[in-house]
Amino acid sequence: MQATIEVSGLRKRFGRTLALDGMSFTVEPGRVTGFVGPNGSGKSTTMRVILGLDAADEGHALVGGRSYTSLRTPLCHVGALLDAAALQPSRSARNHLLWLAHSQGLGAGRVDEVIEQVGLSSVARRKAGGFSLGMRQRLGIAAALLGDPAVLMLDEPVNGLDPEGIVWIRGFLRSLAAEGRAVLVSSHLMSELQDVADHLVVVGRGRVIADTSVAAMLAAASGDRVTLHTTARERATSVLTPAGAAVTVTERDTLIVSGLPAERVVALLSAAAVPFSEVAAHRATLEEAYLDITRDAVEFRGAAR
């Protein structure tokens, strides 16, 4: 089975709310694709349509060229974690996975393999209802891996994980993609995606806003800006502004300068004897890039204090 997710022209309405408005993108094999957007942007609805949990009004969503509902043993083609709480609390972790495995024609040996992969061997016979959120996340990831699928879809996989778990999941997701799998990760934590994702699909108001590599998105957000460290902010601003620069204060001794190359900034400050410790090309974070590109797509915004 080909390791791809193809979403084409999805439209979905819940009453008066248009949840999906022509959503289209492709998740390619061999890379981690981040799926991001503000609350209410259509991420969860899209993932539910891919998994056959919701039906689209228009368009289609295919996994390896086929609809999810047509797959005889779906867990052997696509593994998904949408809700870590979706388990029977009175069952042990191992029995929870055994129940899923038997439904797909898989044996107990595979259950023990994935339990070890996610680090739950020591608690496999404990009731899942007593698990912490992080342990439930690991159990959900184990369930997604049961059928050794070519496609993986994970919603907020680092939620509840401790620092060791976060480091583990970063490396684990990269290793899965390196094996040629298509990995789709929905998350609100841009700092985590910056470390693990190769590609981003950014959505807002039910449609795709950007479909690009992480590197390209960061480069576009960084632009021609320069980071300047100086103890003389006001003097530096008074020198650079008349030369055509736009200057923004980000921290006590840090300015972001746009409109002038780094060499020109250095020359102007040196000629005016303005002290500075560093001038460097600005490197935007993924969070900066994301906030910039989704500014007009946010539906729920808190009031500033």
Image (cartoon, rainbow, N blue to C red):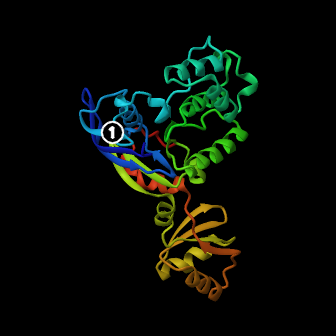
Residue furthest bottom as drawn: 271
Taking the spot 53% from the left edge, 55% from the top edge, the residue there is 286
Classify the position of the N terminus by image quarter. Answer: top left
Amino acid at circle 1: Ala
Q: Nearer the viewer, residue 219 or 30?
A: 30
Taking the spot 40% from the left edge, 27% from the top edge, the residue there is 72
- Residue 17 position within the rendered picture, expressed as x and y whole percent measured from the top left: 28, 31
Taking the spot 60% from the left edge, 49% from the top edge, the residue there is 174
Work out whether 72 lies above or below 99: below
Is 20 on the left-hand or right-hand side of 115? left
Q: Which residue is mark 1?
A: 61
Work out whether 117 lies above or below 210: above
Q: How many marks?
A: 1
- Residue 122 position within the rendered picture, expressed as x and y whole percent measured from the top left: 76, 25
Work out whether 229 lies above or below 7: below
Q: Quadrant of residue 142?
A: top right
Is 158 on the left-hand or right-hand side of 49? right
Q: Secondary structure at mark 1?
A: strand
Is 63 on the left-hand or right-hand side of 226? left
Q: Nearer the viewer, residue 134 or 168?
A: 168
Q: Residues within 10 Å of mark 1 (few under 14, many from 20)?
A: many
Q: Nearer the viewer, residue 273 or 4?
A: 4
- Residue 91 position within the rendered picture, expressed as x and y whole percent measured from the top left: 62, 13
- Residue 95 position within the rendered picture, expressed as x and y whole percent measured from the top left: 62, 16
